[in-house]
Amino acid sequence: MLDQLTDRLTFLGVLMTLCHYYPTKVLFFQFVAFLDIAAHWMHLHATDLTGKETHKGSKNPILNVYYTSKACLFWMCFGNELFYGLLFVNHFWAGPGLLGIHFVPLLACAVCPVALAKSAINVLHLVTASQTVAEHDREKRGYLLQQSAEEEKKDI
């Protein structure tokens, strides 16, 4: 749990700083922050409700590959962090340039699809976790209704 909290707070701090550095992109950074927090919280909540040992097991094939392939997980996280890190660096220094094209923003553009894919995975986290919570609530409600019906039969 501590690693989740550390990851979320650190990423949120980076996004807040980027909001300051790129005021025209505030809504984008806010959306990324909200999505990241909501998706991870809901995923952990669903894991807690279902009693699973880890939040990393998933029936969804994309999430399953994401978490079971160490290479996939590493490169997705690395690319995502690199993208936001490059945006931070670009505020201070664009790097060497050739013909008006600078290295730092060019590299940020190259890894941007990874950051977008990571956000798409967060959407998938949110959707699958929401489905798990809804299914758990449905099962619990059904169990409680069944218990209530049995108690009414006893009272008759």
Image (cartoon, rainbow, N blue to C red):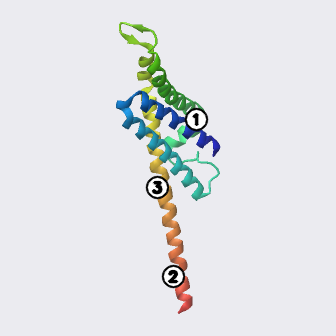
Label 2 element class: helix
Q: What residue type is labelled 3?
A: Gln
Q: Which amino acid does label 1 sit on?
A: Ser
As shown in the figure, which amino acid type bears the numbered disc 2? Ala
Q: In this view, does 151 lie to the left or right of 107?
A: right
Q: Is mark 1 on a helix, strand or loop?
A: loop
Q: Where is residue 65 in the image (x, y as percent from the top left)?
A: 54, 39
**Which mark is first along the chain, 2 or 3?**
3
What residue appears at the point 45 percent right and 24 percent down from the top-left corner? 87
Compared to 40, does 90 lie above or below? Answer: above
Residue picked out by circle 3: 131
Q: Is 146 positioned to the left or the right of 1 in the image?
A: left
> Which residue corresponds to mark 1?
69
User: Callout 3: helix, strand or loop?
Assistant: helix
Against 149, residue 137 (above or below) is: above
Mark 2 highlights which residue? 149
Residue 89: image x %, image y %?
A: 48, 21
Q: Which residue is drawn at 42% across and 27% down?
A: 21
Please identify the quarter of the rendering in which residue 111 is found: top left
Mark 1 and mark 2 lie on one chain; the one further toward the N terminus is: 1
